[in-house]
Amino acid sequence: MGSKNMPLPTKARAAILTCSVAAITAIGGWYGADLKMSQEARKGTHKKESATGPEMLAQLEDARRGLVVKRTELEKKLTELDRKRTSVDTDLSSKLGDKG
């Protein structure tokens, strides 16, 4: 019977085409993102290597400002957590003290 040359059903052909396009799109996006990241890394390395003294100092000061802001935010969060913990401990102690 000549089943070797039978065309695929329309649904199967559409499914294969859809999967192929999705795979190509995903791989292209992944490759493009990887390429962009490596280019940005090279640019950052080049900037650091070619920076003069004053430029390097400015970059370091910017980085320091960012770190100080992060530290301040973390200290606020820690203070708030400590305040909440103390409040819970006080409430728990007063409830246990009433029952004892």
Image (cartoon, helix red, strand yellow):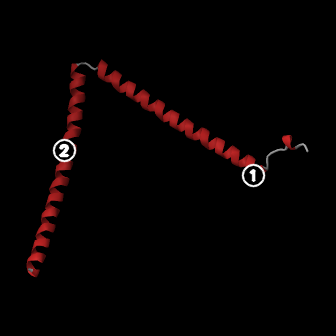
Disc 2 from disc 1: Cα separation: 58 Å
Count residues near mark 2 (Cα–Cα under 10 Å), then give few for <14, some for 14-19, many for 20+: few
Q: Is residue 11 left or right of residue 93?
A: right
Q: Residue at x 90, y 42 (%)?
A: 2
The residue sitting at the bottom extreme is 99
Residue 11 numbered mark, or none = 1
Residue 41, percent from left and from top:
38, 28
Q: Is residue 100 above or below residue 82?
A: below
Front residue of 12 and 100: 100
Q: Tag 1's secondary structure?
A: helix
User: Which quadrant would residue 59 be assigned to in this image?
Assistant: top left
User: Amino acid type of disc 1?
Assistant: Lys
Type of amino acid at the residue the image marks with label 2: Arg
> Where residue 35 sits: x, y (%)?
48, 30
Q: Is residue 85 left or right of residue 32?
A: left
SS category of the residue bearing label 2 = helix
Q: Label 2, on which residue?
A: 71
Relative to 12, residue 42 above or below: above
Image coordinates of residue 56 in percent, x first then y, are 24, 24
Residue lying at 11% horizontally and 69% vertically, measured from the top left: 90
Which residue sits at x=65%, y=45%? 19
* Location of the N terminus (image quadrant): top right
Residue that extends furthest to the right in the rendered view of this protein = 1
Q: Nearer the viewer, residue 99 or 58?
A: 99
Q: Quadrant of residue 27?
A: top right
The answer to which quarter of the image holds residue 98 is bottom left
The quarter of the rendered structure image containing the C terminus is bottom left
